Image: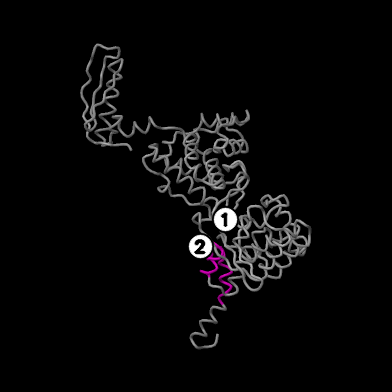
Amino acid sequence: MTEWSYTVRIWAIRKRDYRKPYQLRWRVGVRPHSESFLTLGLAESRRAQLITAAREGEPFDVDSGLPKSLVSKERDISWYEHARRYIEMKWPHSPGSTRRTLAEAMATVTPALVKDTKGMPDVQAVRTALYGWAFNMNRREEEPPAELAKVLAWFERKSLPTSALADRMKVRAALDALTEKLDGKTAAASTIRRKRAIFHNALGYAVEAGLLSDNPLPNVQWKAPEQVAEELDPACVPDPGQAAKLLEGVRDQSARGRRLVAFFGCMYYAAARPAEVIGLRLQDCDLPRRGWGTLRLRETRPRSGSAWTDSREPHDKRGLKHRPRKAVRTVPIPPELVALLRWHVTAYGVAPDGRLFSTQRGGLIQDTGYGEVWAEARSRALTPAQRASALAKRPYDLRHAAVSTWLSSGVEPQLVAKRAGHSVAVLFRVYAKFLSDGDEAANAKISARLGRPA
């Protein structure tokens, strides 16, 4: 921890019979300091620096004896190097998907924080070099291909010093860069917010490292581009009849489809995320012969990519999204899903580790595999006009269908949010249109309570 003091005393330069004869002496707090110089001019220049800093009220570092401005200058490193150190700091405690997100954010802002763009490589090469190599700790010990090594060397030369980000205009340029995708189009609002938060955190780390005196980002009057509210479009969400046909389309298409029909059923009837279903084990299911059952969701297996995980496996093993590691989400499931899961266990058994869903070889279900099955199910279950629309475009739309069905059935929003595994605030923001559809029913209930007809 750096100790600062405003108590500074600077003595006159004295000459001695040494190789560097001119000695400057001063004291910070109670600690003495000295420097020797070959010429009187150099000694006087350093003395003037110290005197000016003391007169301007700068604190002095007790250990080095230097004013804060000179300490920061000596510690300064390039933004490129600071970003690498920031990734290194965050890496050990971050899951694969977060590591990938951190790398993406740093790869987006770093090209905006250069001295000039002369000789800058093309956008795709920059992206590959920064995202895939510079900000990936798993590849720190590997030698990048020659063409990518040249890109990284260019950033080592051209990157601004981190101290330059005290200039708010530099920070604004980085924020503007966060809003664009590689193709020049505007990124989604959630992506911009996420990258801005990471950039803010990286600047905070620069303050901790003594590279900046304070975080400049909160003082920049910058606003992200206006975008539409992040409400779910009802046109994407299948109704119960359409969802039933889609599940039939999964079951009837092939042996692989039959193996996955209960997998998709968990998304539709339990509003489970795909990564949660991948990690679901038989011991976490109550499947009675009659009536409602229960799923206890406690683990996710998100696909992060083997380049970002410690195990070098494509999937991470994590707790529930935005929840403590040992949190469990209990979801009651209707008899339809109970029957599907009981049939699945009878037909296919479970994986050696107890997982309900696995490939024929016992591996983890892959998004590419179940994505192909879903695409085929859409072609079987939907009309040409529906297939051309956004209706059930993604398997994840089954989760949206579950939540919208619960809401339209009159289930309290707080309970819906609890079962779906997100906050009430997210529920109201994302499913606002489904909530507004219930106004008429709500009005009728209020009128009945007030004792008059609706």
Rendered view: 334 above or below 228: below
Q: Amino acid at mark 2?
A: Ser
Residue picked out by circle 2: 423
* Earlier sequence position, callout 1 versus callout 2: 1
Assess disc 2: are there few (<14), some (14-19) or many (≥20) residues with their C-alpha within 10 Å of its C-alpha: some
Q: From the viewer's perspective, is 138 left or right of 213?
A: right
What is the x, y in percent for residue 280?
62, 58
Quadrant of res 241 = bottom right
On screen, 213 above or below 367?
A: above
Residue 272 % position (x, y) = 61, 61
- Left or right of 36 on screen, residue 238: right
What residue is disc 1 on? 299
Report the colour scheme.
one colour
Instruction: Tell me the distance, in whole angstroms, between the alpha carbons under discs 1 and 2.
Output: 18 Å
- All told, the count of numbered labels is 2
Foreground residue among 160 and 128: 128
Per the rendered image, the range of residues in magenta is 413-439
The answer to whether residue 424 is magenta is yes
Q: Are marks 1 and 2 in contact (CB under 8 Å)?
A: no
Viewer-proximal residue, 3 or 349?
349
Query: What is the secondary structure assignment of the residue under circle 1?
Result: loop
SS for dot 2: loop
- What residue is drawn where x is 69% and y is 68%? 339
Inspect the image, locate mark 1, and give the three-letter code of the amino acid beneath it.
Glu
Q: Is residue 194 magenta?
A: no
Magenta segment main secondary structure: helix
